Every structure is written in C-alpha cells, then in structure tokens.
C-alpha cells in the first residue's frame, strides 16, 4: 500500500481558470462563494495570529529601549494542534538538551555562526531556555555595548512545543561606520528555528501544522552589509520601514524535508526590499 500525504496549502484558496478549487480525498471540486469567503477568513485570521505572536516577542525584547543600537530579530514556531504537555516529560532531560543544541549548531553556515553563541540553559516560566553566556533569565548584562548586544541570543521552548528565538545580532557597525544588516544571521536564525520545529515535531510525535513567523526591529535606513562592497548605493537599498514581520504555515513533514523553503517563505519580502537575491539562501541546506 502506498500512502501519499498532500498537505493543505497555506495560500488557499487558489484560482484556476477564473474559479476557486478545493479537494477532498479523491477528487477536486469548484468552491462555492461561502467556501471561498471562509478560506479567505481563515487566511486573514492566520496572518493576524502570526503578527500577534511576533509582536508579543518584540515586546519581550530583553534589551531596554535606550540601550538598543542594533537591529534585533525574533522568531516564533507555534504548533497549531499539539498537546499542552507534548514536551513536559522531556524538557529537563540531557538528551533533549543535546537534540536542541545539535539541531541549531547544524544550522550554522560558513556565512553565519550565530548559533555558536548559545552557551547556557535554564528552566524558564514557559518551560526551558537556552541563551548566550550573559543573558541569564533574559536579563542582559549591566555593561551592555553594541558588540556585546550583537552576541545576545536566546531560544525558549514551551511544554506544548512552541519555540521562540531572539538575537541582538541582526546588524553591526561596518567599515564605513554605518550600522548595516547582517543578512546571513537574519537567514540562519529562522532556518535554525524551522529545523528545530521539524526535529521536535518528528521526534516527539507531533505531525501537524505550525505557524512560523519572523520579526525584525530597528531596521529603517539600514542596508545589507554587502552594500559596503559595491559602488552603487542603489544596488542594495536601505530598508524603508522600522520593522519587518512576516510568517507562513508548514507541516512537520515540510519543516523536516525542506527548512530552506520555509526560511525563504518568511524572508523573501525582506530580501527583496534589501536588493538581496535568493542566492543568499544557498549557504543553508
């Protein structure tokens, strides 16, 4: 017997030949007006939920507003139908700690070693956290400076499998003295988040769907760091908004098989606005 799983499209409904189509177990059918309205409502609700999840993480930025110099990046992976105690029995196990760290370290690339900053782990109110060496309980060091801010990194896991990540290293001062966006770090962070969500779901029995969202702050006026290597300023335009928020939906199977595609789905608008092509994604598997 051959079983084929065709996951629901997060972009449904789709129009073909001026009509919207849906499918059931064996065939496809033309959707009624009410079915189309319902699917559009589901998409709007999902987009709102992703936006709310990211905004909640942005509000939790551990760095006080007066001390923020760099662009910061936030990520959320929220399972849509997991048990509330999916990870309760394993959160404190050493084997679980090794699974998390190994998955994230494997997401490092030649262009970004951002996950190497994870040094400590601790129990948290939502479940368990992993952080850079001087970010205990999400409290930054008193002697925070832009270089140390760039090394801040945090990952948090809840009992139901929800994952959040944060890095203060989405930008840095370049050779010209201007703060520029570290696009490789901005790619490696959501790629690691997607890979970790897939690994957790596959290992602990959650095969359902996830909301995957990314947000970045303190972005306005900043260019890609690659702008310093070209003569034409227009080749890499400055980002025109103070923040970026975008998300998508994926199944555990999709996260396991192709985290690169999920990363592209949440970042393509950001890369486009910065004049970056998809080849920046070539460094990740």
Image (cartoon, helix red, strand yellow):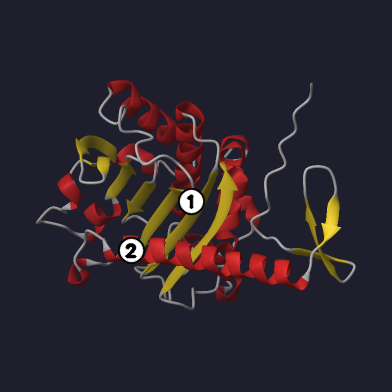
Residue 148 in view (yes/no)? yes
Count every numbered label the image shows and give the total: 2
- Residue at 28% in and 66% down: 59
- 224 or 22: which is nearer to us? 22
Locate residue 66, reporting x and y percent: 18, 72
Of badges 2 and 1, nearer the viewer stands 2
Q: Quadrant of the N terminus?
A: top right
Locate residue 101, reporting x and y percent: 36, 31
- Residue at 30% in and 48% down: 153
Which residue is under mark 2?
Answer: 56
Q: Quadrant of residue 142?
A: bottom left
Identify the mark at residue 184; answer none if there is no mark: 1
Q: Note whether 143 is above or below 81 in the view shown.
A: below
Q: Do the residues bearing badges 2 and 1 touch, measured as CB atoms within 8 Å? A: no
Locate residue 90, reporting x and y percent: 32, 27
Residue 183 in view (yes/no)? no
Q: CA distance from mark 2 to mark 1?
A: 24 Å
Q: Residues within 10 Å of mark 2 (few under 14, many from 20)?
A: few
- 246 or 63: which is nearer to us? 246
Q: Note whether 62 is above or below 195 in the view shown.
A: below
Q: Quadrant of the C terminus?
A: top right
- 25 or 206: which is nearer to us? 25
Locate residue 156, reporting x and y percent: 31, 44
SS at mark 2 in the image: helix
Q: Residues within 10 Å of mark 1 (few under 14, many from 20)?
A: many
* In the image, farthest residue toward the left: 142
Label located before the other in sequence (2 or 1): 2
């Amino acid at each position: 017997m051959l079983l084929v799983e065709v996951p629901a499209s997060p972009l449904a409904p789709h129009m073909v030949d001026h009509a919207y189509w849906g499918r059931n177990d064996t065939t496809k059918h033309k959707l009624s007006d009410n079915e189309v309205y319902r699917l559009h409502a589901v998409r709007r609700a999902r987009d709102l939920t992703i936006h709310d999840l990211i905004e909640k993480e942005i509000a939790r930025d551990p760095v006080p507003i007066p001390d923020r110099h760099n662009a910061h990046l936030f990520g959320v992976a929220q399972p849509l139908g997991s048990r509330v105690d999916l990870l309760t029995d394993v959160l404190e196990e050493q084997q679980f700690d090794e699974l998390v760290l190994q998955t994230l370290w494997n997401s490092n690339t030649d262009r970004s070693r951002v996950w190497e900053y994870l040094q400590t782990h601790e129990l948290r109110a939502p479940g368990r956290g992993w952080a850079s060496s001087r970010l205990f309980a999400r409290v930054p060091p008193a002697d925070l400076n832009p270089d140390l801010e760039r090394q801040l990194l945090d990952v948090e896991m809840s009992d139901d499998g929800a994952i959040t990540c944060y890095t203060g290293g989405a930008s840095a001062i370049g050779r010209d003295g201007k703060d520029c966006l570290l696009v490789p770090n901005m790619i490696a962070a959501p790629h690691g988040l997607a890979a970790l969500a897939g690994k957790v779901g596959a290992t602990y029995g959650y095969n359902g769907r996830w909301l995957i969202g990314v947000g970045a702050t303190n972005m306005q006026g900043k260019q890609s760091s690659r702008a310093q290597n070209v003569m034409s300023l227009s080749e890499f335009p400055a980002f025109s908004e103070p923040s970026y928020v975008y998300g998508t939906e994926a199944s555990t199977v999709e996260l396991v098989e192709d985290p690169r595609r999920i990363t592209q789905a949440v970042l393509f608008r950001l890369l486009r606005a910065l004049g970056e092509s998809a080849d920046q994604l070539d460094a990740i598997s």
